[in-house]
Amino acid sequence: MDQSRMTLGRFLARHCPQDEKGRTLALLLRQVADSCRRISDAVGGGALRDLTGAADNVNVQGEEQKKLDVFANDALLEGCSWGGTVAGMASEEEDDVFTLPEDEPRGPYILLFDPLDGSSNIDVNVSVGTIFSVLPAPDAGRDPVNEDLLQSGDQQVAAGYVVYGPSTVLALTVGNGVHVFTLDRAQGEWFLTTADLKVPEQTAEFAINCSYWHQWPAPVRRYIEECLAGEDGPRGKRFNMRWVASMVADLHRIFTRGGVFLYPADSRRPNGRLRVLYEVNPIAMLMEQAGGAAFTGEERAMALQPKELHQRAGLLIGSREEVAVLERYYSEQ
Ligand SMILES: O=P(O)(O)OC[C@H]1O[C@](O)(COP(=O)(O)O)[C@@H](O)[C@@H]1O
Ligand SMILES: [Mg+2]
Ligand SMILES: [Mg+2]
């Protein structure tokens, strides 16, 4: 391996602000990456680690928790609750904001995460991931409560995801582009492998769960029908379709070679499926930082003002020109 590659630690020291808060942010992102290294190891162990299957519990989303959901959630809560980096944390798997142990110092940030994205793929050995978002903690002189976390995506100071696939990759932004690191599993170190990733503006590939066709809103039906019409249709070109059903894996493909990912609000799920604070906002920040766009069906995703901790939203995200087509179809409706 090329030993001159930049490590995550060196990257963070250079790219986070050069003040006390910036150093704290660098430590927090290091803590997240270390926790994800543990999760990567657990995912890689598969059935040997006794972490496949259900955990006999239902989370606040009403979804059956998998053992790996619980492991990943605990790894992140444990790995980031020391050192004065966060004032509190919130997770897709926790009912309310997580308060730090009394004897731990409180820090200036709030960490929010989907510890294990793509849970339905764990037991079939398909890529899964972790998604995270960093918000400023309100300077309230007390532990944060749920309402303190109801900030729009535009307030995020950092966001990222990790894909546990054939290789383990971390895509990260601290507000100056998207940078991708690959985990050297033997050394336990993250190395920068793509600096300043940009999403191609045009594309001919879409990702959507087509089994919900009957409940889609009209603009999404129109968009997909026109894609499926190929060279002879109004779009004048042939489109390809991919659907992994782990949002992080679908999005990593789109970050790498372009495309759109659609999980719209529909007649069965009028509020959408994906969680605003743990899935929509961090992925939308990364997408905009990479030159793409993210739309809820009503507004720019990062402008959405959440009203509840576990709020959901529609999401139409990816290459800028395709998202612009979708925005036009919604506005013409
Ligand atoms: O079952 P569907 O409709 O294909 O849903 C898949 C979507 O659900 C999710 O798995 C939701 O995430 P969780 O696994 O964290 O609940 C997304 O990653 C994915 O895009
Ligand atoms: Mg998820
Ligand atoms: Mg999850």
Image (cartoon, rainbow, N blue to C red):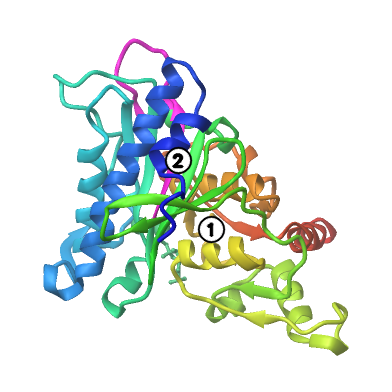
Residue most toward the bottom?
Answer: 232
Amino acid type at mark 2:
Ser
Residue 226 pos. (x, y %) = 79, 79
Task: Establish if 47 lies above or below 57.
Answer: below
Residue 228 is left or right of residue 234, and the answer is left
**Residue depicted at 64% across the width and 44% down the height:** 289
Tell me which residue sits at (79%, 87%) in the image: 229
| Residue 135 belongs to magenta span | yes
Labelled pair 2, 1 in contact (Cβ < 8 Å): no
Neighbour tally class for label 2: few under 14, some 14-19, many 20 plus, Cα within 10 Å = many
Residue 157 tag number: none
Indicate whether residue 6 is drawn in magenta: no
Residue 5's spot in the image, x, y percent?
Answer: 46, 50
Quadrant hosting residue 102 = top left
> Bounds of the magenta span?
130-148
Q: Position of residue 61 (x, y in %)?
A: 34, 54
Q: Residue at x 33, y 42 (%)?
A: 32
Residue designated by label 1 = 272
Residue at image location 72% in from the left, 62% down from the top: 200
Q: Amino acid at mark 1?
A: Gly
Left or right of 102, for residue 148: right
Q: Nearer the viewer, residue 3 or 141?
A: 3
Instruction: Determine whether, in the image, residue 289 is placed left or right of residue 84.
Output: right
Residue 217 pos. (x, y %) = 67, 67
Q: Image height check: is 21 above or below 230?
A: above
Instruction: Name the image quarter holding the N terminus.
Output: bottom left
Q: Secondary structure at mark 2?
A: strand
Tell me if residue 19 comes above or below residue 204 in the rendering. Answer: above
